[in-house]
Image (cartoon, coloured by chain):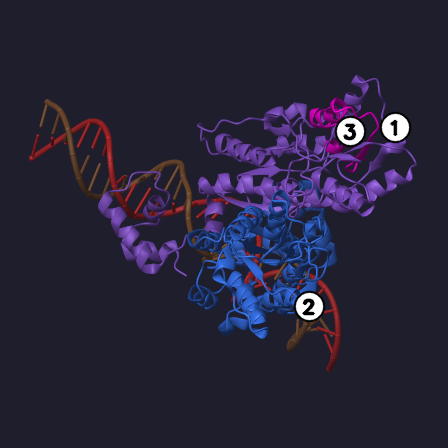
Chain colours: A purple, B blue, C brown, D red
Amino acid sequence: MATIYEVSKLAGVSLATVSRVMNNNTPVKESTRRKVLDAMAQLDYRPNSIAQSLASNRSNSIGVLVSELHGPFYGAMLTGIEAEFRAAGKHVIITAGHSDLATEQDGIDFLQSRNCDALILHVEAVSDDYLLQLAAGDTPFVLLNRHIPAIADRCISLNNELGGYLATRHLLQQGHRQIAYIAGPMWKTDARDRYHGHQRALAEYQLTADPALFFEGDFRETGGSKGLESLLQSGKTFSALVCANDEMASGAITAARELGLNIPQQLSVMGYDNVNFAYYTYPKLSTIDYPISAMGQMAARWVLREVYQQESNEVQQLFEPVLISRDSVLAAT
Amino acid sequence: MATIYEVSKLAGVSLATVSRVMNNNTPVKESTRRKVLDAMAQLDYRPNSIAQSLASNRSNSIGVLVSELHGPFYGAMLTGIEAEFRAAGKHVIITAGHSDLATEQDGIDFLQSRNCDALILHVEAVSDDYLLQLAAGDTPFVLLNRHIPAIADRCISLNNELGGYLATRHLLQQGHRQIAYIAGPMWKTDARDRYHGHQRALAEYQLTADPALFFEGDFRETGGSKGLESLLQSGKTFSALVCANDEMASGAITAARELGLNIPQQLSVMGYDNVNFAYYTYPKLSTIDYPISAMGQMAARWVLREVYQQESNEVQQLFEPVLISRDSVLAAT
DNA sequence: GCTATAAATGAAAGCGCTTACATTAATACT
DNA sequence: AGTATTAATGTAAGCGCTTTCATTTATAGC
């Protein structure tokens, strides 16, 4: 594989001139440029981006750390990020932290060691302190789906509390008063915030959350189906169910059907996130829209503006959830 | 940020000795090793993996090129790959080719330029010739979901034709004789192979595929719903529908319901892939199991064995599809 | 104690590129 | 034609590590 040495020899110019042609950042006479480009083509020269990165302390790539690689939520997030960077001629290096402290730290170390120009971090386990320390370092980063006031300028987030509020308020407005709740893992901030919103909506109707109508799920379908079974065994009746994400809602609906419950006649169900298949469940799922793909796109634009000085990129940092009313909620009788 | 120079100075040893301690590949006296490790800890030394890669022509990472970052199929594939490497202490660099020729080539170039020790390629647009040329180069790679006889030892694939055959044969065994088909994009090999299997099953029952009962979809939900609408408008009656993947099956089922068709009483539906939510559709989707997560895991093991000499890894290269019979297929009346 | 051998460690030269500063060539003005 | 200025290009020294070959130190045997 040809190197810059061979190109410079064949073109009859210096290494610096070849480098100038590659990077196109300082003037090179047109005839000289032509000689260099011809030599590159003839040798099928491919710049070694490892050497470029060492020499320049740049890598022209962005590290992305997400919690998982599967699931519609992460798929949409990654797609939003990657599409924006692909249009800008950048590459992303993706790794997963699995909501585990050591794995998240290892992932960040890995991305930093690859000399990423910036990081987009969807992390849940590392502490605010850890991220503040990271912010004091040299690697620019933007947080997705997390808000830390001390570094608010680097956060792209959604008002999860408001989303939790809107979900439950919708059921209350439809006349439901006995509302069960299947939460995400409550050590996760967004799971807690959604539940707080649920509680706030209930309080507006002089209601309090009944612990017997609460189940802590895992954001997976099985969490939803197990959650519904557990709630039904509580002996308490409820006419509506809020699930803290669409995957658990989908699981709950399937379990309900197996138990002979008619959705939404006998049980109204709300989801959260508005992932792609929410439209294809039966009945079509009422949910809270969480524009994660757009948020991923904004994180990418933040990087393009802050790190690559592409000033035309406007960045929205705080997103609002929106009620999506479909067929899985019916007025209480 | 401390470099190997500062570590060697603080420890009072040479650069080579520090490097030997880092790589632990040649003998270092225990007392010397202790001095170096203490100096590293005191300086909070982090090796620069860019410099390591340039000097050693290794990167300790594997490049993964997939068609998409979203969707349950790709999520499962990536998860299978990443989990195996994470257990082995390796990192993956993931990029997407979007089934586009230029983007796939660019992605391969990107991963090669990052000095990946090996590549795992799920590519659809680049030609067999291109891959044969790549195989002649220096970068080891394994193909996922593609079989090229000349490099069969580097291919992990599924017998898609058999899967297409099993899907349609199941319906034929249930008495269906008028079977519609919603294909994937027919320029894709797996889409064609699945259809060929469909045709082979029909031929065993002295039937031929009716062009009016064929719709070329896009492997997306919308492809399924549009496909069903189109097929119904053909005027031809059919009692069963094969969709070339679960996402289109899910879309078709939703469209059927909107059109007042009862699944499976009035229309049996088969999917393909057995992605996670196939269990949660209503009715639960009969499908063909495509163990893409296990295949991803095998691709990872291939790399561990071939590139990192971890001989304990056994690698299965050819996978067989399996019929998963759930509730969306009923015997013909 | 001397000699031969083995172990441990150091010196130095890259790996492939970037870039600051120096040099040369080209151009403009008098 | 000479001089000053500007443009273009070359030289050389890293960037942070690895690794080959040389040197030094340690050990064993006589």
Q: Amino acid at mark 2?
A: Asn
- Nearest-to-viewer mark from 1 and 2: 1
* Residue at position x 81%, y 19% in the image: A203
SS label for mark 2: loop
In the image, the segment drawn in magenta is A162-191
SS label for mark 1: loop
How far across and down, in percent of the image, does residue B19 sit?
Answer: 62, 55
Callout 2: chain: B
Callout 3: chain: A
* Residue at position x 69%, y 49% in the image: B277
Q: Is residue A270 left or right of residue A14?
A: right
Mark 3 to mark 2 CA distance (whole Å): 45 Å
Residue beneath label 1, please? A210
Where does the C terminus of chain B fall, quadrant-wise? bottom right
How far across and down, in percent of the image, does residue A316 sit?
Answer: 55, 26
Mark 1 to mark 3 CA distance (whole Å): 12 Å
How far across and down, in percent of the image, does residue B114 sit?
Answer: 51, 52
Residue beneath label 3, please? A195
How far across and down, in percent of the image, does residue A331 sit?
Answer: 75, 27
The answer to if B73 sits in the magenta stretch is no
Q: Is residue A207 left or right of residue A47?
A: right
